[in-house]
Image (tube, rainbow, N blue to C red):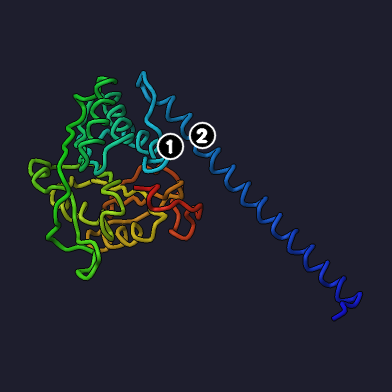
């Protein structure tokens, strides 16, 4: 079968257009990645300037919180001077929060961790910076969660969460930072955080949830806002941030809020987010 000159020209034009379109897309994607990398480096630079620690931060890639959200955490804590901060999932955030509390000269961080290994790493880092006095690090295995959960009863992985007895003496929490347990624990693994502490929050408490570029975390935020009467805002950080505040409370803006659809679409797999 012979190809006519007209057909050959049409084929060449189609190939040329495809190559150009692919090149344009590659260029756009490269610019997006460069901009986001710059954003994280810029946030890391500002964070390092704010911190009073003498050593270096743990690696802030993979499961760790990103520099942009850690910068906002540190800035928010120094501005609002919370008395009690609770976090689920220890790590770089523990060091950053403790540093802000020490610079404020007031407050306490209660940090929940399910892994002995990561708990030991966190404690070692705190001790190296003489920050252990600002943190009550509590380590306990994940256990079955018996309360209400978004994880369906038919799910492959049953609902598990931190040992509830670790929360018994907590009260008047001003800031709840949720970055654990890992998303692979079960569906909607971080949902119990607010139900477990709902009656332990101060009147002006805020709840921050990391990783809201994931649909599960967005669903959790929406449910928390609905059930708890919170105002929900999303912030377009690298992995996304959901922020819940009491209706009628004065707010301290950490950045311009966005809808979930405005969050970065840069692909980060679940095993990189924790």
Q: Quadrant of residue 60?
A: top left
The residue positioned 19% from the left and 59% from the top of the image is 159
Q: Which mark is residue 210?
A: none
Picture coordinates of residue 115 (x, y %)?
22, 40
Residue 48 in the image: above or below residue 82: above
22, 37: nearer the viewer: 22
Q: Which residue is mark 1?
A: 67
Q: Secondary structure at mark 2?
A: helix
187, 209: nearer the viewer: 187
| Quadrant that contains the N terminus | bottom right
Picture coordinates of residue 261 (x, y %)?
47, 60
The residue positioned 86% from the left and 76% from the top of the image is 7
Mark 1 touches mark 2? (CB < 8 Å): yes
Left/right of residue 165 with respect to residue 272 in the rendered view: left
Q: Earlier in the sequence, mark 1 or mark 2?
A: 2
Q: Callout 1 environment at 10 Å: few (<14), some (14 to 19), or many (20+)?
A: many
The residue positioned 29% from the left and 59% from the top of the image is 220
Picture coordinates of residue 202 (x, y %)?
18, 45
Give the residue furthest to the right: 5
167, 270: nearer the viewer: 270
Left/right of residue 4 with respect to residue 202 in the rendered view: right
Q: Callout 2 environment at 10 Å: few (<14), some (14 to 19), or many (20+)?
A: some
Q: Which residue is mark 2?
A: 41
Picture coordinates of residue 107 (x, y %)?
21, 30
Left/right of residue 241 with respect to residue 117 in the rendered view: right
Q: Secondary structure at mark 1?
A: helix
């Amino acid at each position: 079968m012979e190809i006519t000159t007209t057909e050959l020209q049409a084929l060449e034009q189609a190939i040329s257009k495809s190559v150009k379109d692919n090149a344009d897309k590659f260029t756009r994607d490269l610019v997006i990645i460069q901009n986001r990398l710059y954003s994280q480096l810029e946030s890391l630079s500002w964070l390092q300037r704010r911190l009073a620690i003498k050593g270096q931060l743990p690696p802030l890639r993979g499961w760790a919180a990103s520099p942009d959200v850690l910068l906002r955490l540190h800035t928010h804590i120094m501005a609002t001077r919370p008395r009690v901060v609770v976090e689920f999932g220890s790590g770089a955030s523990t060091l950053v929060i403790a540093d802000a509390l020490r610079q404020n000269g007031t407050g306490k961080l209660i940090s929940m961790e399910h892994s002995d290994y990561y708990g030991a790493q966190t404690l070692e880092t705190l001790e190296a910076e003489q920050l252990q006095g600002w943190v009550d690090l509590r380590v306990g295995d994940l256990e079955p969660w018996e309360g209400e959960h978004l994880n369906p009863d038919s799910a492959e992985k049953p609902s598990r969460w931190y040992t509830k007895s670790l929360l018994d003496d907590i009260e008047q929490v001003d800031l709840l930072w949720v970055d654990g347990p890992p998303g692979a624990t079960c569906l909607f693994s971080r949902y119990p955080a607010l139900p477990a502490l709902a009656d332990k929050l101060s009147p002006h408490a805020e709840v921050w949830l990391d990783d809201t570029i994931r649909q599960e975390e967005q669903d959790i935020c929406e449910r928390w806002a609905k059930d708890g009467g919170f105002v929900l805002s999303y912030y377009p950080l690298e992995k996304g941030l959901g922020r819940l505040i009491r209706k009628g409370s004065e707010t301290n803006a950490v950045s311009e809020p966005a809808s979930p659809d405005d969050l970065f679409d840069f692909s980060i797999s679940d095993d990189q987010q924790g």
